[in-house]
């Protein structure tokens, strides 16, 4: 390497030169900083090794000058000294731009390694005047202290004589006048006795005008008292501190405050104590620090949002988190994202952070300015360029009044367009609490930020499109076979191990191929689209699996008939109305194939395969709907046939009521009756309830039949009362009836003619607990009418004591299973005993149903059960027989249950 070594000691210079040349390097010399700069102007070198303390220009200043000059600013520079070695010295060297700080003596290899390491570093930026100023005061301080020490060695007592001060001033005057920092000396009265050229420039005050003035003239009024206090405290400091460290304060220039950095030294002289103030104007530095701080915040926002873009799964998350990061990380007052609507006319806010509800309410109106309007969002969209207001208090705004912005707490604003494929799709609006926040550097970063968000919008849209194509049919918008199978698998797993019926139904459109051939592919696609829309409205699980094959799931049904009924309902809704295709109205039919989990398959693929097999059988046999399992077909066909007959039975009034007497244990006489429905079929005779009640409930016909039963039971009760036998009739309430929103109104209607005292409603415990809060309200309304309410099959449900106490009921009916178990085990007896005790504690009557033996009756009587009913006393009988029993006195003899 060709190296320049700089040292004012010839011996040191010669020794280092010999060592470097022995290592094979070329050396040129300089005796101080001024000489070194001249050498560098003449010759190119590969590195500089410099001493620090030298005449004319020291090593720190030489390093600064090298870094300021573009021609050789990147040359590796090593400071090599034996005078100073403290952390402060090393920090000073680094701030001056030195690549290394090495103390003497050192091996030449150490110096060469430092130079080679510096050469490998990225080029250093040139040092600005501000950076040069950073080092001037410390250098001056070192020189001043060195000169003072020399003067002390020569016994020049500056504290005793004015002549000594003048001599010291003369020695320092050249350095003071050429210093970059301001130097001000004040006496004990804080009046200025020294004001150098730099101070004159900093304070914009001529030296002559400053001399003799109080230093407070250059300090803002609000800081003067504090400044005077600091000086007094420093003056009376009992320690040996001669310097007050640098601190940032504010000064006055032409009456305007600006920031300075000041440090104070004190010196006792024969003329009294003097104070020297070193002053540096840090306006530019503060501005640079503020700018760097802002840029760092924007960099943090950019980094956070780029991280967000990688993990964001949808636009809502992207928008919401981007606004949050801008406010929480970037220190912005508010942030919002507005997107252009589908019609391309207005901008709608889709995400926001910071701010107040009032501000966003106003912004919602203002941001919704038409895309072709004159508001800031519209201007950004039209120009595809940011719209910036850096001083809202002075600038005219297109979006909102300055007062509105100031009230919201921000002073500057930027609206950036979000551009995808050369077209704006929305805007990012940012608001800062400071004026002049959006500098050129920040706007460059924010443009990049807006570009990243726009890229993410486009990326997510494309991913969404790809996912949509992968999962959905493009013609109908319904899930395709892959997605339907995946969802079916999830539903199968959820149903596994539970007593649930899950059916897969496939349907095939009739005459689809002929429509395609005669009316064209467009008409065929339109048929598929309309059919898909109707199916989706009829069943939310609908999907398109093939050319003209659709599928849906039927859940929460209890029988094959239920599934078949659901298919018929969907078929009627979707294919009953005509299809308008190519100007024609066409009737399109369908056929269905059904597979049921778990009997027809234990997984989604097997269920679909078997449903397809059932569909093929339906098409081959010209059947409307076919189940995969033949037994299912038979049960469904039988249930549907029974349902049809039940509908006719309602029309033909084939239902009748039989009554089972309730017996009072105390007197052994009939005290009431339970109405039980029977179907008097012309073909099958008297049909037992278990053969048709479930079908009535599944088909929804139970509502009409239940309403009829209420009316008929009250009609019979009124007739008995007119005959002199006032008897309360109990009528069972189905879940469907209780769920009716007008159930209480229905009871009020049927009991309007003084029938409330004749009616008792029996409702199973599980039905009441389905929606207990609502049912409590409904039943209370009914109870207030005077109607009695009994909980049927008590003990088989899942009610809690808390709810039993709240329910407006009058009696509990012990389920037949508990009555039978009472005589078989002590546990069974304990259960019945507990139910009776609970009911009596709640002032409720207890009715035991299904009593068939004298032993059961005896035990119930011992337990003080109130009423009983069962085959031991009487089966359910027609109303005329019931009337005859009461006419005979109402006393029932125990009968053989067989």
Image: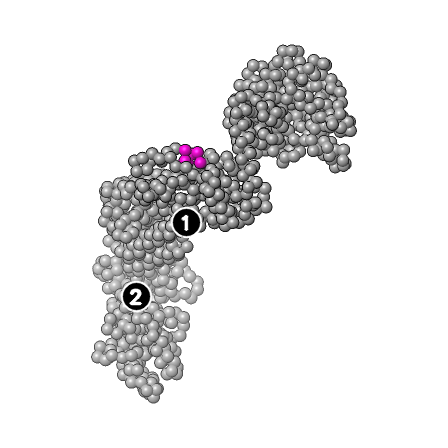
Q: Is residue 744 visible?
A: no
Q: Residue furthest top?
A: 723
Residue found at x 52% / y 22%: 651
Count the marks: 2
**As rendered, which of 848 and 365 lies closer to the eye?**
848
- Residue 572 colored magenta? yes
For the residues carrying marks 2 and 1, which lies nearer the camera in this image?
Answer: 1
Q: Magenta residues: mostly which secondary structure?
A: helix
Q: Is residue 638 visible?
A: yes
Residue found at x 28% / y 64%: 130
Q: Quadrant of the image for the N terminus?
A: bottom left
Sort mark 1 into few (<14), some (14-19) or many (20+) by Cα contacts within 10 Å.
Answer: some
Give x and y (percent) for residue 861: 76, 26
- Residue tagged 1: 471
- 676 in relation to 19, above or below: above
Horizontal side of residue 765 vs 467, given as left or right: right
- 30 in relation to 465, above or below: below
Q: Secondary structure at mark 1?
A: helix
Q: Report the span colored magenta.
A: 571-576
Give x and y (percent) for residue 168: 29, 71
Q: Secondary structure at mark 2?
A: helix
Give x and y (percent) for residue 243: 38, 65
Q: Quadrant of the image for the C terminus?
A: top right
- 593 in relation to 200, above or below: above
- Residue tagged 2: 131
**As rendered, which of 226 and 308 lies closer to the eye?**
308
């Amino acid at each position: 390497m060709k190296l320049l070594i700089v040292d004012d000691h010839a011996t040191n210079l010669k020794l280092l030169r010999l060592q470097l040349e022995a290592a094979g390097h070329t050396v040129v010399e300089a005796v101080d900083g001024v000489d070194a700069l001249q050498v560098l102007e003449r010759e190119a070198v590969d590195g500089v090794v410099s001493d620090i303390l030298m005449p004319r220009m020291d090593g720190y200043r030489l390093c600064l000058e090298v870094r300021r000059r573009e021609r050789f600013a990147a040359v590796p520079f090593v400071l090599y000294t034996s005078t100073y070695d403290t952390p402060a010295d090393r920090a000073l060297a680094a701030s001056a731009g030195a690549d290394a700080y090495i103390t003497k003596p050192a091996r030449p290899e150490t110096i060469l390694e430092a130079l080679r390491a510096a050469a490998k570093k990225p080029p250093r930026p040139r040092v600005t005047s501000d950076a040069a100023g950073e080092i001037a005061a410390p250098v001056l301080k070192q020189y001043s202290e060195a000169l003072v020490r020399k003067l002390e060695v020569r016994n020049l007592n500056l504290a005793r004589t004015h002549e000594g001060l003048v001599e010291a001033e003369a020695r320092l005057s050249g350095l003071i006048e050429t210093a970059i920092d301001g130097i001000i000396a004040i006496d004990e009265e804080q009046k200025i006795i020294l004001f150098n050229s730099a101070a004159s420039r900093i304070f914009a005050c001529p030296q002559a005008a400053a001399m003799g003035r109080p230093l407070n003239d250059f300090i803002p009024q609000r800081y003067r008292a504090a400044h005077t206090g600091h000086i007094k405290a420093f003056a009376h400091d009992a320690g040996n501190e001669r310097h007050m460290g640098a601190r940032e304060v504010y000064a006055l220039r032409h009456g305007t405050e600006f920031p300075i950095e000041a440090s104070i030294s004190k010196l006792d002289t024969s003329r009294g104590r003097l104070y020297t103030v070193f002053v540096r104007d840090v306006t530019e530095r503060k501005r640079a620090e503020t700018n760097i701080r802002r840029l760092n915040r924007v960099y943090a926002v950019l980094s956070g949002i780029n991280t967000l873009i990688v993990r964001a799964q949808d636009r809502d998350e992207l928008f919401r988190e981007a606004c949050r990061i801008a406010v929480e990380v970037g220190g912005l007052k508010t942030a919002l994202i507005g997107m252009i609507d589908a019609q391309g006319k207005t901008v709608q806010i889709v995400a926001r952070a910071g701010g107040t509800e009032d501000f966003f309410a106003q912004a919602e109106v203002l941001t919704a300015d038409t895309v072709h309007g004159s508001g800031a969002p519209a201007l950004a969209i039209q120009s595809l360029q940011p719209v910036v207001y850096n001083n809202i208090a002075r600038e005219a705004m297109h979006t909102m009044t300055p007062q509105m912005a100031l009230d919201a707490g921000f002073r500057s604003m930027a609206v950036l367009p979000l551009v995808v494929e050369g077209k704006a799709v929305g805007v990012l609006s940012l608001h800062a609490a400071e004026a002049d926040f959006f500098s050129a550097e920040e706007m460059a970063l924010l443009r990049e930020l807006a570009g990243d968000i726009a890229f993410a919008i486009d990326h997510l849209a494309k991913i969404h499109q790809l996912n949509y194509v992968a999962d959905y049919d493009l013609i109908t918008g319904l899930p395709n076979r892959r997605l339907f199978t995946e969802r079916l698998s999830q539903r199968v797993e959820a149903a596994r191990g539970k007593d649930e019926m899950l059916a897969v139904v496939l349907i095939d459109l009739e005459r689809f191929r002929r429509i395609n051939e005669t009316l064209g592919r467009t008409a065929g696609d339109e048929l598929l689209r309309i059919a898909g829309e109707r199916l989706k409205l009829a069943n939310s699980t609908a999907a398109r699996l093939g050319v003209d094959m659709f599928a849906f799931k039927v859940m929460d049904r209890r029988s094959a008939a239920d599934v078949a009924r659901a298919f018929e309902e969907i078929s009627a809704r979707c294919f009953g109305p005509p299809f308008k295709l190519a100007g024609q109205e066409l009737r399109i039919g369908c056929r269905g194939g059904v597979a049921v989990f778990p009997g027809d398959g234990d997984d989604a693929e097997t269920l679909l395969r078997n449903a397809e097999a059932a569909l093929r059988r339906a098409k081959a046999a010209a059947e409307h709907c076919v189940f995969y399992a033949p037994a299912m077909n038979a049960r469904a066909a039988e249930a549907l046939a029974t349902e049809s007959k039940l509908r006719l039975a309602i029309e033909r009034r084939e239902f009748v009521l039989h009554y089972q007497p309730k017996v009072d244990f105390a007197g052994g006489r009939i005290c009431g009756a339970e109405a039980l429905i029977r179907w008097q079929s012309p073909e099958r005779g008297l049909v037992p309830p278990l053969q048709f009640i479930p079908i009535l409930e599944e088909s929804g016909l139970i509502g009409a039949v239940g309403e009829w039963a209420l009316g008929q039971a009250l009609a019979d009760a009124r007739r008995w009362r007119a005959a002199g036998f006032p008897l309360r009739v109990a009528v069972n309430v189905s879940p469907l009836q209780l769920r009716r929103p007008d159930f209480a109104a229905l009871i009020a209607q049927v009991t309007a003619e003084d029938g409330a005292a004749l009616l008792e409603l029996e409702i199973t415990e599980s039905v009441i607990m389905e929606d207990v809060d609502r049912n409590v309200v409904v039943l209370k309304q009914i109870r207030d009418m005077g109607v009695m309410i009994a909980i049927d099959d008590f003990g088989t449900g899942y009610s809690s004591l808390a709810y039993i106490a709240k329910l407006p009921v009058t009696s509990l009916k012990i389920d037949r299973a508990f009555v039978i178990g009472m005589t078989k085990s002590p546990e069974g007896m304990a259960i019945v005993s507990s139910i009776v005790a609970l009911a009596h504690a709640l002032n409720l009557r207890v009715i035991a149903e299904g009593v068939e033996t004298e032993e059961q009756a005896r035990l119930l009587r011992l337990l003080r059960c109130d009423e009983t009913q069962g085959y031991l006393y009487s089966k359910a009988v027609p109303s005329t027989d019931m009337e005859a029993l009461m006419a005979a006195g109402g006393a029932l003899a125990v009968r053989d249950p067989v």
